[in-house]
Image: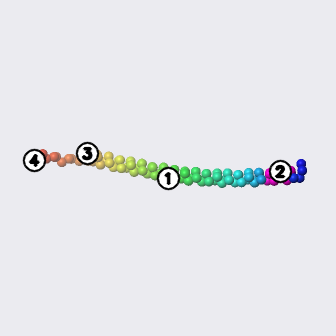
Amino acid sequence: MSLNKSLLALAVALALTACAQQAEEAATEAATEATEAAAEATDAANEAAAAATDAAAAVAAAATDAAAAVEQAAEEPQPEETPAQ
């Protein structure tokens, strides 16, 4: 192989190596960003689940209070209605 062909082959090999290295760095960066986004999404989901749990507890407490109020109202004597004159 002539010297020119050898130098050309070397230049092509170096260019391919540089491209592969850049691609690897870009893939690593993309994977890091995806991992961070997944962690943020997990945190948001956990916060939403906690909020939903709190809301469910508040609804259950309100329902219990309402049931107790209805029961108490049913137990209280009702005033007799006077006939209209």
User: Which of label 1 and label 2 is nearer to you?
Assistant: 2
Residue pointed to by mark 2: 9
Residue pointed to by mark 3: 74
CA–CA distance in space, label 1 to label 2: 57 Å
Which residue type carries mark 2? Ala
Of callouts 1 and 2, the N-terminal one: 2
User: Which of label 3 and label 2 is nearer to you?
Assistant: 2
Q: Nearer the viewer, residue 57 or 8?
A: 8
Residue pointed to by mark 1: 47
Residue pointed to by mark 4: 85
Which residue type carries mark 4? Gln
| Residue 17 relative to residue 75: left or right | right
CA–CA distance in space, label 4 to label 1: 63 Å
Q: Nearer the viewer, residue 2 or 41?
A: 2
Q: Nearer the viewer, residue 75 or 28?
A: 28
Which portion, as a residue range, is magenta?
5-14
